[in-house]
Image: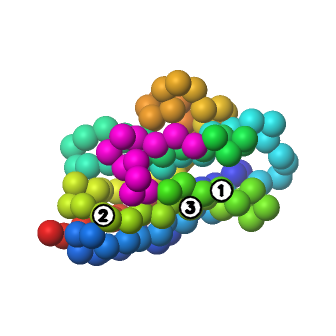
Amino acid sequence: QVQLVESGGGSVQSGGSLRLSCALLRVTYSYDNYCMGWFRQYPGKEREGVAAVDRNYTKRYANSVKGRFTLSLDNAKNMLYLQMNSLKPEDTGMYYCARADYCSDSWFREDDYNLWGQGTQVTVSS
C-alpha cells in the first residue's frame, strides 16, 4: 500500500526557516496524473492547503505563503519538499503531505485528497 511519510518539522523563531520532506513509499507503478500537496492544521480547525504541484510541475500556493514557501518535487526519488522561509508565528501547525488524483481548481481543499501522511509539527515562536 502506498504511504506518505513526512519529516523535517521542528521549532524555530520568527524569521527562521525549515524544510519539510515527504516520502512516497511503496510506489509500484507510475501515475498518469497526480497532485501532491502540503496542508496545515491549527488546533480545532480544518486542514488548509498551503501548496500543491502536479505531474507537470505546475505549482500552486496559498496567498499567505507566496514568496516565502517553495515547493519542489523530485519524481526520480518520489520525494516532495516544502522550503519554508521567513516563518511567522501564524505558520505554526501540523503539516501534512497529501496526494490527489489531479490538481483541481479547489486544490486547497482537503476533500480532493485521498492519501495522507501522519503529519509533522511546525512551531514558530515570536
Horizontal side of residue 116 vs 33, given as left or right: left
Residue at disc 1, secondary structure: strand
Image height of 37 relative to 118, above or below: above
Kind of residue at badge 1: Leu
Query: Gap between marks 1 and 3, in whole Å?
Result: 6 Å
**Where residue 73 is drawn, which disc sits there?**
1
Name which quarter of the figure residue 104 lies in.
top right
Query: Gap between marks 1 and 2, in whole Å?
Result: 21 Å
What residue is pinned by disc 3?
A: 81
- Residue 78: give x, y in percent of width and height: 71, 59
Q: Residue furthest left?
A: 126
Indicate how the structure is coloured in the image. rainbow
Q: Which residue is found at the position 24% from the left and 61% from the top?
A: 88
Q: How many marks?
A: 3
Q: Which residue is found at the position 71% from the left and 51% from the top?
A: 1
Name which quarter of the figure residue 81 lies in.
bottom right
Any part of residue 91 in sight: yes
Horizontal side of residue 13 vs 118, given as left or right: left
Name which quarter of the figure residue 122 lies in.
bottom left
Around disc 2, counting alpha carbons within 10 Å, would you say few (fewer than 14), some (14 to 19), or many (20 or more)? many
- Residue 57: give x, y in percent of width and height: 68, 45
Residue at disc 2, secondary structure: loop
Q: Earlier in the sequence, mark 1 or mark 3?
A: 1
Instruction: Find out whether the residues at labels 1 and 3 contact each other: C-beta distance under 8 Å.
Output: yes
What residue is pinned by disc 2?
A: 87
Q: Which residue is found at the position 70% from the left and 60% from the top?
A: 74
> Magenta segment, which residues?
59-69
Image height of 73 relative to 66, above or below: below
Residue at disc 3, secondary structure: strand
Q: Earlier in the sequence, mark 1 or mark 2?
A: 1
Kind of residue at badge 3: Tyr
Kind of residue at badge 2: Leu
